[in-house]
Image (cartoon, grey):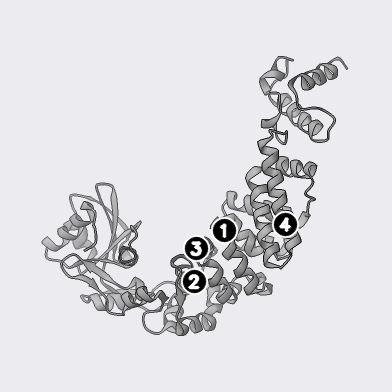
Amino acid sequence: MFQLSPETQIALKTLNRAGFEAYLVGGCVRDYLLGTSPTDIDITTNAKPEEVKAVFCDYLTIDTGIRHGTVTVSINHQAFEITTYRVDVGYSDGRHPDKVCFTASLYEDAARRDFTVNAMAYHPDTGVIDYFHGRDDLAAGVIRCVGDPVRRFGEDALRMLRALRFAATLGFSIDEPTAAALRQQKHLLSQVSAERVTAELFKLLVGKNAGQVLRQHLPVLAAYLPELGQLDPDMTGALLRRLPQTLHLRLAGLLIRLPFEKAQAVFERLRLDNKTKKNTLSLLTLYHKRYSIDRHSLKYQLWNFGVSTVLDYYTLMAEARAIADDSLGANDARRATAQVRDIIASNECYSKETLALRGADLAEFGLVGAQINEWLTHLVYEVLDGRLENTREALLNYIRKKNKQ
């Protein structure tokens, strides 16, 4: 028995009391069986959309996908997507069904789904209903298409990226017929929007099994991002296995061995949020500029890129060098990390925040707004270049002297 929330029980019982079948379906059933709490609860039913809305007339309902049989119902602020059993007919654009036909059969509804582990249904009275042996695949750690994988991917090319993503996030392998269909149908990824590719790629990259998935299936992604075709899958996969499950680190690890302009071309094709783009580009910029790792240079790196980026960079460098059997380079990166941490612990100056002077001190000289910011920046450079000591007295004396001049 799954531990269902009171709201989930209300949703099922409300449909059942009105004379309709209702089951939890898809990813939430998979997650319950894996012992994790699902983030979304999807329900399938033989009730038509207008019947669902009538049954839940006392609750907020939203026609989120009513053309495809989906109504969202909010019960005590928990949202449920409730979808009528359906059969999808035709996929002329390779992404969306041309027509949706409602059916009275739970089996037919399950048969249209992508993977066996996502095709199970559950009701407290019946337990798990598993027409396609998804529970066996879940136990074996296998991603397998429902039915013919070539047909499944031909219907919706996004399913190829979902296969890779599920393998990465769940730590599963992809069964050989499904993997063969991935290789055969990878050209269809051109039909998927950049937004959807980006979303699936990001989830894949932070998955615990991302390294293994990329080692085995990098050519699939290269069908959409051809720059990746020049990468060594073994080296790329090995590096990602060693990196923390952090998006910008993993994305930089994926692109680090590309020429900088090719990495930028990948960015142009994806839809990156500003934070991810900035963080990843900073890591790649550090890599391609190849700064020295003496203490003076490290402070300048901290000034230009910030503490977290510099620490992430040397983590990336240590692992990249280790993968390349460059033990000297790996050790240099580790020494740089130790020096950065020592600079921070010693409270040495590498930013406005670590100056021994504050904006309020400058205001006493009649400076305001942008003038204060310009002076603080100037003082940081003076300290970084060794022309000034980072003490309050030395900095104030310098300002007094400049003011007299």
Q: Which residue is mark 3?
A: 207
The reply to whether discs 3 and 2 touch (Cβ–Cβ < 8 Å) is no
Q: Which residue is mark 1?
A: 271
Question: Is disc 1 placed on a helix, strand or loop?
Answer: loop
Q: Which residue is mark 4?
A: 331
The reply to whether discs 3 and 1 touch (Cβ–Cβ < 8 Å) is no
- Which mark lies nearer to you, 3 or 2? 3
- Give the residue type that dot 4 points to: Asn
Local crowd size for mark 2, using a 10 Å CA cut-off: few (<14), some (14–19), many (≥20) = many
Q: Distance from label 1 to label 2 (Cα)?
A: 19 Å
- In the rendered view, does 347 fall on the left or right side of 100? right
- Give the residue type that dot 2 points to: Leu
Q: Which residue is mark 2?
A: 164
- In the rendered view, does 364 fall on the left or right side of 249? right
Q: Quadrant of residue 251?
A: bottom right
Q: Distance from label 3 to label 1 (Cα)?
A: 19 Å
Q: Vertically, is 191 above or below 391? A: below
Q: Earlier in the sequence, mark 4 or mark 1?
A: 1
Image x and y of residue 153, in percent: 45, 78
